[in-house]
């Protein structure tokens, strides 16, 4: 790995014809030397492209931020007025998770509850979050957007400061519970989700039960987890298979 | 280039090459939802995955476009972008699951562009950049200025080096240091000696 002087001499055109010819012959017959020379010249190419790539990345980040902030607003607006479309997305979401669980169960030995939780838990997709048009106030919208943007602590603060605890709608209770889950406060999450789960007519009832069962799993309250999963299986077909798999696992 | 409803493939290529904001925004608006659906539906990825993969793919395309000879996509930009994104996603999943089996993956676009070539180039660029970042600030400046065509005298003045001779010596030391750190990186061995994309197996997740 000490051919650098040779490489530099060749690249700067300082070699005589004889030296040049000998160097090229060595390159053709010595794979190690050829590898080293390739890396040596590729370094130059990378350095030349480096600044351009950095500038491009920055510009792309700006555009991406611009795009996603607009996209998010659109989504939030969509959430306020679309009440049925979520079912398809929820079904796809559940199907993906079911496939994930199936693969997990087939290929791996018995994991810990924490591992099962880590495997199953993912934040609720924002386009799955729906609510009735009756409560689509600006504050509610903001709550959903905060959750959607991953600002969970801010979301919790906002709900607690802007809404009265007693008059919190079921959807907001669910978003609050999900935010607590994201911050690792599963006790508070379970408490609020349990309250929300009493509203059986709510459009997000299935989601609520699913995340409540995950909270119990995380807290290793298996009897509660099992009870919630059984209710989920009997009430929400889009979650039943996924819930059944988890039930089998913990029982 | 002003904001338009539709850009031709050549305009898109130009726009990316020049980091044109309107064109990049157009690409996001028009193609990101498609790519996101593919990543989520076909690979079980998330919205965040899709964002990262899309961004990485755009950098790969940009690098191809500023290369010599430059990448020429000609007609179907979406098709090309999809292939790059899919390939990146497969590779990511393969690495994540430590998948080592080998299978066949088609690496040629409809227009005969070998995607593998650009993917490997991107991987190599990332590896080199990683090591370049680790160099000291002065070394990075020195190497960059030299490759930007500044003379040794100009560099000596600009970086306030003691003499041109020292500048030359320092530049070589910096480059050797970079070379050694890249050359001893095991990832490089995989990139150089590893089997090409065309004979890698699509992992079964």
Image: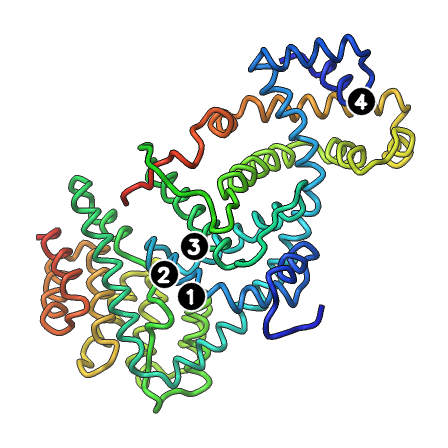
- Residue sitting nearer the eye, A151 or B126: B126
Q: Of marks 2 and 1, which one's residue comes earlier in the chain?
A: 1
Q: Earlier in the sequence, mark 4 or mark 1?
A: 4
Q: Residue A119: horizontal and vertical position, in percent? A: 27, 51
Instruction: Answer yes or no: are tags 4 and 1 on the same subunit.
Output: yes
Provide the residue designation for mark 4: A12
Judge the density around disc 3: few (<14), some (14-19), many (≥20) Cα neighbours within 10 Å: some
Helix, strand or loop status at disc 1: helix
Q: CA distance from mark 1 to mark 3?
A: 20 Å
Residue A143 sits above or below residue B145 on the image? below
Labelled disc at residue B105: none
Tell which tag, 2 or 4, sits nearer the viewer. Answer: 4
Q: Which residue is mark 1?
A: A152
- Classify mark 2: residues with Cα within 10 Å, few (<14), some (14-19) or many (20+): some
CA–CA distance in space, label 4 to label 1: 57 Å
Marks 2 and 1 sit apart, C-alpha to C-alpha, by 7 Å
Report in which chain the residue with disc 2 lies. Answer: A
């Amino acid at each position: 790995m000490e051919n650098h002087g040779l490489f530099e001499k060749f690249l700067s055109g300082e070699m005589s014809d004889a030296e040049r010819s000998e160097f090229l012959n060595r390159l053709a017959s010595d794979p190690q030397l050829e590898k080293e020379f390739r890396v040596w010249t590729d370094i130059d190419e990378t350095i030349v492209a480096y600044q351009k790539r950095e500038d491009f990345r920055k510009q792309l980040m700006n555009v991406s931020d611009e795009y996603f902030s607009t996209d998010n607003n659109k989504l939030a607006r969509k959430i306020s007025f679309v009440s049925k479309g979520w079912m398809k997305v929820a079904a796809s979401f559940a199907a993906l998770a079911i496939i994930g669980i199936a693969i997990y169960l087939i290929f791996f030995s018995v994991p810990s509850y924490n591992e099962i939780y880590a495997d199953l838990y993912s934040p609720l997709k924002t386009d799955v979050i729906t609510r009735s048009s009756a409560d689509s106030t600006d504050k509610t919208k903001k709550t959903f957007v905060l959750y959607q943007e991953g600002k969970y602590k801010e979301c919790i603060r906002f709900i607690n400061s802007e809404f009265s605890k007693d008059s919190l709608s079921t959807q907001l209770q669910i978003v609050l519970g999900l935010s607590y889950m994201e911050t690792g406060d599963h006790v508070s999450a379970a408490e609020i989700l349990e309250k929300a789960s009493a509203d059986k007519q709510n459009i997000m009832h299935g989601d609520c039960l699913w995340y409540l069962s995950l909270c119990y799993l995380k807290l290793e309250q298996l009897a509660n987890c099992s009870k919630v999963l059984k209710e989920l299986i009997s009430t929400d077909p889009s979650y039943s298979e996924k819930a059944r798999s988890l039930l089998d696992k913990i029982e | 280039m002003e904001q338009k409803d539709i850009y031709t493939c050549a305009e898109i290529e130009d726009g990316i090459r020049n980091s044109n904001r309107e064109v990049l925004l157009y690409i996001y608006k028009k193609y990101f939802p498609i790519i996101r659906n593919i990543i989520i539906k076909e690979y079980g990825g998330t919205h965040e995955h899709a964002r990262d993969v899309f961004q990485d793919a755009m950098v790969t395309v940009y690098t191809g476009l500023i290369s010599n000879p430059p990448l020429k996509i000609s007609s179907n930009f979406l098709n090309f972008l999809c292939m790059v994104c899919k390939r990146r996603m497969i590779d990511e999943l393969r690495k994540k699951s430590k998948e080592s089996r080998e299978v066949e993956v088609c690496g040629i676009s409809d227009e005969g562009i070998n995607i593998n070539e650009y993917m490997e180039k991107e991987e190599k660029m990332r590896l080199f950049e990683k090591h370049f970042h680790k160099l000291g600030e002065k070394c990075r400046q020195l190497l960059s200025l030299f490759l930007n065509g500044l003379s040794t005298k100009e560099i000596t003045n600009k970086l306030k080096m003691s003499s041109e001779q020292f500048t030359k010596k320092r530049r070589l030391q910096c480059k050797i240091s970079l070379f050694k750190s890249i050359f001893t990186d095991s990832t490089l061995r995989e990139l150089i000696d590893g089997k090409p994309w065309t004979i890698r197996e699509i992992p079964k997740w």
